[in-house]
Image (cartoon, helix red, strand yellow):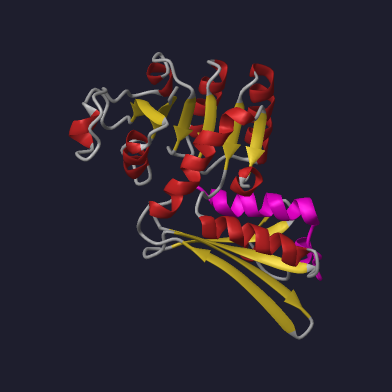
């Protein structure tokens, strides 16, 4: 039986190619598409290369009136938490690709998913290079005691830090917290210039035209330093393979799984 998939943010940057990929997969079937800007339109009219006869809905709650196994959310920071909780409440598994969720949001989602017996896979970034950055940075943190993170994104991205940077700080904190030579509170001058402290790591968010998504983990030691960096291009292709993997794996879990590498063989 094919896995029934609904995509929230279906007409967005990742949503469009993801709809196509799901529609073309032998083991998946696209049963729902959510887009507030294209509500009421036929999906095949909105995305010309997706020949699926369904009507775009304006909310996740409306879309999930159609029986669904997995909701994939690639929306925005102001709606993602509500979308995820709505799906969980209906007993639907969720794959989260949107950014903007805090550690408190994740705790709430984990509790709700556990209570309802469904799985949620959330990754700050589904690109393989981002997964490798996390893995290599966590390995470096075992041996290097000082690090900070630079979070790059387009000037149109409102939330900061990005989901990629948030996920990296969470994973690094599982290894240990970085050492700090001078406490942030002891900064001479504007303390804000030292960035924000997230899970013990200092994060500096840059929002400028010309960037898509990028994260740089910089490790420092006496007379040496190590830089590990991921940069995304203008296309969404790197995210599709990882998202499809998460769609196929999410039913094997109950509760929240943070990070694509935790479901990879």
Q: Residue furthest bottom?
A: 223
Magenta-tinted stretch: 159-186
Inspect the magenta stretch and tell me whether residue 92 lies in it. Answer: no
Camera-side residue: 66 or 13?
66
Q: How many marks?
A: 0
Quadrant of residue 147 within the rendered picture: bottom right
The residue drawn where x is 53% and y is 15% is 90
Judged left or right of residue 94, residue 195 is right
What residue do we see at 53% from left, 60% from top? 129
Q: Residue at x 57, y 32 (%)?
A: 250
Residue 161: in sight, yes or no?
Answer: no
Q: Is residue 181 above or below residue 110?
A: below
The reply to whether residue 193 is visible in this rendering is: yes
| 1 lies above or below 204 | above
Q: Position of residue 249 (x, y in %)?
A: 57, 35
- Residue depicted at x 63% and y 47%: 265
Does the stretch in magenta take in 166?
yes
Residue 22 position in % (x across, y down): 37, 36
| Side of 93 relative to 239 (left or right) | right
**Snapshot quadrant of residue 23:** top left
Q: In the picture, which quadrant includes the N terminus?
A: top left
Image height of 97 relative to 35, above or below? below
Provide residue 159's location: percent of width, then percent of height. 50, 47
**Could you tell whether 181 is left or right of 3 in the image?**
right
């Amino acid at each position: 039986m094919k896995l029934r998939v609904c995509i929230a943010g279906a007409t967005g940057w990742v949503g469009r190619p993801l709809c196509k990929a799901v529609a073309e997969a032998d083991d998946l079937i696209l049963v729902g598409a959510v887009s507030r800007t294209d509500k009421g339109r036929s999906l095949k009219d909105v995305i010309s290369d997706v020949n699926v006869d369904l009507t775009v809905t304006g909310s996740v709650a409306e879309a999930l009136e159609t029986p669904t196994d997995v909701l994939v959310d690639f929306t925005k920071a102001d709606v993602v938490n509500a979308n995820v909780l709505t799906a969980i409440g209906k007993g639907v598994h969720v794959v989260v690709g949107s950014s903007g969720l805090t550690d408190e949001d994740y705790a709430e989602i984990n509790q709700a998913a556990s209570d309802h017996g469904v799985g949620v896979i959330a990754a700050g970034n589904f690109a393989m290079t981002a997964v490798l950055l996390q893995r290599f940075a966590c390995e470096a943190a075992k041996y290097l005691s000082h690090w900070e993170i630079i979070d790059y994104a387009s000037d149109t991205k409102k939330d900061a830090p990005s989901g990629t940077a948030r996920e990296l700080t969470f994973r690094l904190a599982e290894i240990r917290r970085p050492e700090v030579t001078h406490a942030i509170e002891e900064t001479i001058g504007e303390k804000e210039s030292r960035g924000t402290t997230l899970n013990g790591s200092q994060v500096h968010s840059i929002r400028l035209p010309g960037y898509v998504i990028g994260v740089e983990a910089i490790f420092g030691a006496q007379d040496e330093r190590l830089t590990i960096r991921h940069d995304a291009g203008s296309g969404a292709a790197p995210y599709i393979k990882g998202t499809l993997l998460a769609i196929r794996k999410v039913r094997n879990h109950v509760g929240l799984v943070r990070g694509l590498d935790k479901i990879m063989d």
